[in-house]
C-alpha cells in the first residue's frame, strides 16, 4: 500500500517539474524558423561557402596548396608575363570550411560568404566553376593586369608607416 502512494507522489511530482519547465518557456521567443520563408541571421565571422572574385585572383596557387582536402582547382596557361588563368573551381563536396584559403589569400579575392544553403539534386552541381566561359582567360602577371585594365592589388607605401611612427 505504501508503494502505491509513493508511485502516485512520484508521478505527480514528475508532472509538476515538467509543467514548470513548460510554463517558463511559454513567454520566451520561439527559436524555430519557418526555413524557406525565414532565414537565420549569421554572425559576422560565420564561415559559409567560399567565394572567389576571379577579377582579383592572380592564380598564385597558395589557396590550392594550403587546402587540406584539395578541393580548389586552378588551371593556368603560359609562363611569366604570358600566364593566364583558365579555370578556378571549388568542389563543395570536399570543402571543410576551414578558412585557410581565405586567411592566406594576398589579393583578398577569396572570401567566406554568409550562405549556408546550397541544396542541389545532383552532387556534380556542387563543383562550382568561378570562371565565366564568355570572359576568356584572366591575366595573372601584375604588369599584364595593369596593361589590360584588370584589378591589381595596391602596393603598401612604407613611407606612410614611418610617418605614423614618428608622430
Image (cartoon, rainbow, N blue to C red):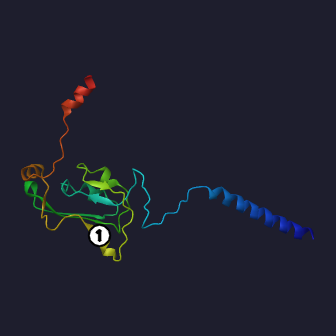
The residue sitting at 88% across, 70% down in the picture is: 4
The residue sitting at 9% across, 49% down in the picture is: 146
The residue sitting at 42% across, 66% down in the picture is: 37
- Measured as percent of width and height from the top left, residue 117 is found at 38, 66
- Measured as percent of width and height from the top left, residue 103 is found at 32, 50
Residue, far top: 167
Q: Quadrant of residue 42?
A: bottom left
User: Between 100 and 134, which is closer to the camera in this rendering?
Assistant: 134
Quadrant in the picture for the C terminus:
top left
Quadrant in the picture for the N terminus:
bottom right
- Measured as percent of width and height from the top left, residue 32 is found at 52, 63
The residue sitting at 27% across, 67% down in the picture is: 128
Residue labelled with disc 1: 127
User: Between 22 and 73, which is closer to the camera in this rendering?
Assistant: 22
Q: Secondary structure at mark 1?
A: strand
Q: Quadrant of residue 165?
A: top left
Q: Quadrant of residue 18?
A: bottom right
Amino acid at each position: 500500500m505504501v508503494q502505491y502512494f509513493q508511485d502516485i507522489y512520484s508521478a505527480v511530482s514528475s508532472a509538476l517539474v515538467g509543467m514548470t519547465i513548460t510554463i517558463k518557456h511559454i513567454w520566451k521567443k520561439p527559436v524555430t524558423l519557418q526555413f524557406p520563408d525565414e532565414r537565420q541571421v549569421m554572425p559576422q565571422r560565420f564561415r559559409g561557402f567560399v567565394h572567389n572574385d576571379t577579377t582579383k585572383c592572380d592564380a598564385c596557387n597558395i589557396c590550392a596548396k594550403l587546402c587540406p582536402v584539395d578541393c580548389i582547382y586552378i588551371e593556368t596557361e603560359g609562363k611569366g608575363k604570358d600566364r593566364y588563368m583558365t579555370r578556378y573551381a571549388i568542389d563543395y563536396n570536399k570543402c571543410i570550411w576551414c578558412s585557410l584559403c581565405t586567411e592566406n589569400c594576398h589579393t583578398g579575392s577569396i572570401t567566406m560568404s554568409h550562405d549556408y544553403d546550397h541544396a542541389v539534386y545532383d552532387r556534380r552541381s556542387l563543383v562550382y566553376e568561378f570562371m565565366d566561359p564568355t570572359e576568356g582567360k584572366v591575366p595573372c602577371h601584375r604588369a599584364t593586369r595593369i596593361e589590360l585594365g584588370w584589378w591589381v592589388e595596391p602596393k603598401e607605401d612604407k613611407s606612410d608607416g614611418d610617418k605614423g611612427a614618428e608622430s
